[in-house]
Amino acid sequence: MTTVSVRVPDSIHRKVKELAAEERMSINQFINSALAEKLAALLTEEYLKRRAERGSREKFEAALARIPDVAPANGDAL
């Protein structure tokens, strides 16, 4: 595990300390969790961009064509 020293404004430190206490976790755990959430969001965005590059209108229409043309179930209609 790596140790990182980070300077943060006092206002952010106070809020992190407060929220960590509410969540019953250490500041270290809270910050690790926040970093992991941010990484997950950024990596998901990258993944979706790569997937979108592989897509095409033709593939989309082919997938839609495989869906049976039936009336929606009760309660599912718009």
Image (cartoon, rainbow, N blue to C red):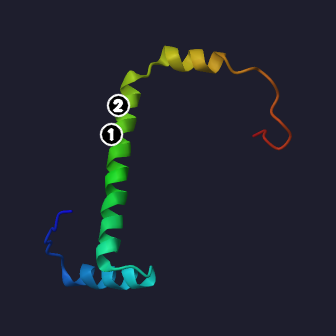
Is residue 33 positioned above or below 48 on the image?
Answer: below
Instruction: Please report the residue visible at 25 percent of the width from the left and 81 percent of the height from the top.
Output: 13
- How packed mark 1 is, by other alpha carbons closer than 10 Å (few <14, some 14-19, many 20 or more), is few
- How packed mark 2 is, by other alpha carbons closer than 10 Å (few <14, some 14-19, many 20 or more), is few
Is residue 12 positioned above or below 35 on the image?
Answer: below
Q: Which residue is mark 1?
A: 46
**Mark 1 in CB contact with mark 2 (< 8 angstroms):** yes
Disc ID at residue 50: 2
Q: Nearer the viewer, residue 29 or 56?
A: 29
In what quadrant of the picture does the N terminus appear?
bottom left
Helix, strand or loop at label 1? It is: helix
In the shown orientation, is residue 7 left or right of residue 74? left
Spatial CA distance of label 1 from label 2 is 6 Å
In what quadrant of the picture does the C terminus appear?
top right
Where residue 2 sits, quadrant-wise, is: bottom left
Instruction: Please report the residue visible at 32 percent of the width from the left and 84 percent of the height from the top.
Output: 17
In the shown orientation, is residue 34 left or right of residue 23? left
Which residue is situated farthest in the right direction here? Answer: 74
Which percent across, then down, holds residue 54? 39, 22
Which percent across, then down, holds residue 55? 43, 22
Helix, strand or loop at label 2? It is: helix
Which percent across, then down, holds residue 6? 15, 72
Instruction: Please report the residue visible at 48 percent of the width from the left and 18 percent of the height from the top.
Output: 57
Where residue 45 sits, quadrant-wise, is: top left
Q: Nearer the viewer, residue 77 or 8?
A: 8
Where residue 70 sits, quadrant-wise, is: top right
Is residue 69 positioned above or below 26 on the image?
Answer: above
Which percent across, then down, holds residue 11? 25, 83
| Amino acid, disc 1 | Glu
